Amino acid sequence: MTPTPFTRPDWVPRVPPGMRILIAGASGGLGSALVAMLLTGPDCVIGAHGATRAAKAKDRRVIPLKKAFATESDCADLVETFCGKAGGIDALVVLTGAIHFSGHWQDMPAADWERDVQINLNQPFYLARAALARMKAQGTGGRILLTGTESAVHGGSPTSFPYAIAKRGTECMVQGLAREGASHGILVNGLRFGFIASGFHERWHGRTAEDMEKRAALVPLKRGGHADEAAALMVFLLSGWSGFMTGQMIPLTGGDWL
Ligand SMILES: NC(=O)c1ccc[n+]([C@@H]2O[C@H](COP(=O)([O-])OP(=O)(O)OC[C@H]3O[C@@H](n4cnc5c(N)ncnc54)[C@H](OP(=O)(O)O)[C@@H]3O)[C@@H](O)[C@H]2O)c1
């Protein structure tokens, strides 16, 4: 089958004007695409962790934030710093993620397990907990988006099992946070990404162009997802059009694992 390539529609979803959005992992492939898409819309305030292209361009709507945040207090500090600069927080998007060991999980050193759990599970929890508390105190509702992976609902793979365990934990987080936030108008959802061509696989798995082609051939739609397709879904989940959705993991997979 010849893949149907991604063709860019002539419209993009929009967030409400003035929305204050903190993006953890804004420097990554999907984070950069999200920032770029948000900046094509009406004014919003973006707290970008990491050095995004937009932050480098010194766009007045982008607040660059410090890169390292490993502990609970780092995460709480990131949320508070953003709130101090933006005057509050309407949305948190967590797009950080990493795989620290490329061999079989049976040989994985304990230190790498700890690092995988720290970035893929602890950090989203601490960030989301701090943001939820802030949003509750503001009393104006809010949105939280977390990131899972489709492979986690199938037991991961030999080289991504610990990452998948941590990512599956974020799915539980989405449900529990959504239950907690519902009566405050705080909606919590998650993205369950499949194979998206964002640079992630080359960076953390050392995949070559040939590896990427082989992997794409396993997807029923015969290609990787485009970073802008992920960004558009996230903007939709931040917009008023998703106001009746909470506690859901939304797959974006090209039919992977069918
Ligand atoms: N692309 C896919 O196929 C796919 C599939 C399933 C799930 N996901 C998930 O989607 C999310 C976005 O990934 P992506 O595709 O955009 O990958 P990416 O380009 O590798 O981005 C990863 C982001 O995480 C940040 N990060 C990594 N380790 C960190 C640490 N210790 N502390 C703080 N930040 C850290 C990176 O910051 P620096 O660049 O500054 O290091 C970067 O902003 C991740 O949660 C990933 O697990 C992606």
Image (cartoon, rainbow, N blue to C red):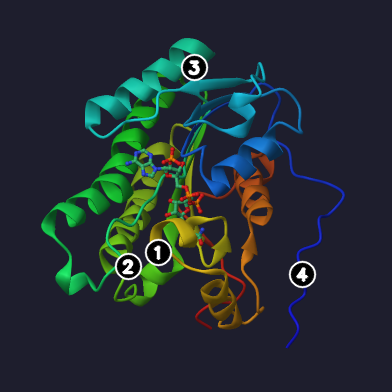
Q: Which residue is mark 4?
A: 5
The kind of secondary structure element at disc 1 is: helix
Q: Using the numbered discs, state the Cα–Cα distance from disc 1 to disc 3 in whole angstroms.
A: 37 Å
Q: Which residue is mark 1?
A: 205
Question: Are the residues at dot 4 and dot 1 in contact (C-beta closer than 8 Å)?
Answer: no
Decide which of 203, 26 is in the foreground and name it.
203
Decide which of 194, 208 is in the foreground and name it.
208
Vertical comparison of 232 with 160: above or below: above
Label 4 CA crowd tier, 10 Å (few <14, some 14–19, many 20+) = few
Sequence-first disc among 2 and 4: 4
Q: Which mark is residue 88?
A: 3
Vertical comparison of 102 with 255: above or below: above
Q: Using the numbered discs, state the Cα–Cα distance from disc 3 to disc 2 in whole angstroms.
A: 36 Å
Vertical comparison of 4 with 131: above or below: below
Q: Which residue is mark 2?
A: 160
Q: Using the numbered discs, state the Cα–Cα distance from disc 3 to disc 4 in whole angstroms.
A: 40 Å
**What residue do we see at 42% from left, 57% from top?**
148
**What residue do we see at 83% from left, 54% from top?**
9
Question: Are the residues at dot 2 and dot 1 in contact (C-beta closer than 8 Å)?
Answer: yes
Give x and y (percent) for residue 192.
48, 61
The kind of secondary structure element at disc 4 is: loop
Question: Are the residues at dot 2 and dot 4 in contact (C-beta closer than 8 Å)?
Answer: no
Give x and y (percent) for residue 43.
72, 22
The kind of residue on which mark 1 rests is His
Label 2 CA crowd tier, 10 Å (few <14, some 14–19, many 20+) = many
Sequence-first disc among 4 and 1: 4
The kind of residue on which mark 4 rests is Pro
The kind of residue on which mark 2 rests is Ser
- Is residue 87 shown to the viewer in this render? no
